[in-house]
Image: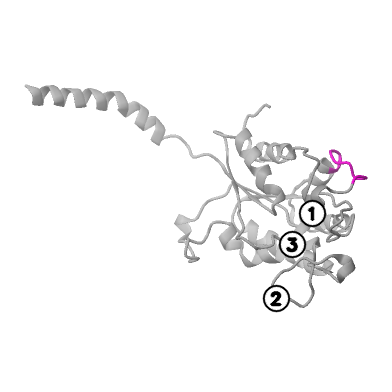
Amino acid sequence: MRTLTRTLLLLVIALVCAPALAQDQGKAPLPRVLVLGDSVYNDLSRSVATELKGRVEVVYARWEQEEVANTSTALAHLDRLLGYLDRDGKPLPKDKRPVWDLIHVNFGLGDLIYRAPGMKSFRVMPIHAGGVRTTPVDQYEANLHELIKRLKDTGARIVWASTTPIRASRSNIFKVGSEVAYNEIAAKVMAGHGVPINDMHAYAKARMDMDKPAGFGADPFHFDNAPLHEPVTDVIVEHIGIDFNR
């Protein structure tokens, strides 16, 4: 009798749970977005992920400690940043690789920072002390062409973000306003590849006091506590095609 009762109970549980389980298994996976950029996009990505929770999976491509995020290092480590390598650094089979619906990308600040010349390891050096810009203009343009080609090979939609403003600071490891010329180069490259641009430069500039030195010697990484995630959220909503209201 006990065995029969237990069997009937298990059958009832199975009948009740089966529709819910089938519905969950049949649920389409969330669209996946990779945010690829320097540390400006770290906290920003968390805010975007919070806004779009349950609608889009937002992933920030994290860097190894001591790595400087710029166009050269992005090209050198792109497979890892895209999630195409396992924990041991070995290539994953194609069917095990993450599929990205959209990649939001920017590199510029790490290219514009001044570094110690003639050193294999990266060390920041102020302009007045003899520092040299990390990525010359011609190299930046060539790197962008190669980067966009490789990102397009993923099959994802690509959106480029313009580099945020650089203002004066006591550390003197950036040249004030140098991002403008590099943004112009990037705009030309993106036009050639048919890649839309998220104008993060204009959005950030409208929210910063450009006449006030950057706080904490942080140069362009400090935005007077202004939230910068909204344009990224809006771009994702537009290109993924989901309903979203703030």
CA–CA distance between discs 1 and 3? Answer: 12 Å
* In front of the other: 129 or 151: 129
- Residue shown at 69% from the left, 53% from the top: 37
Q: Which of the numbered marks, if any, corresponds to residue 191?
A: 1
Q: Position of residue 92 (x, y in %)?
A: 47, 61
* In front of the other: 27 or 78: 78
The amino acid at mark 2 is Lys
CA–CA distance between discs 3 and 2? Answer: 22 Å
Q: Position of residue 57 (x, y in %)?
A: 56, 41
The amino acid at mark 1 is Ala
Q: Secondary structure at mark 1?
A: helix
Q: Position of residue 72 (x, y in %)?
A: 70, 66
Main SS type for the magenta part? loop
Residue at image mark 3:
144
The answer to whether residue 57 is left or right of residue 140 is left
Residue at image mark 2:
120
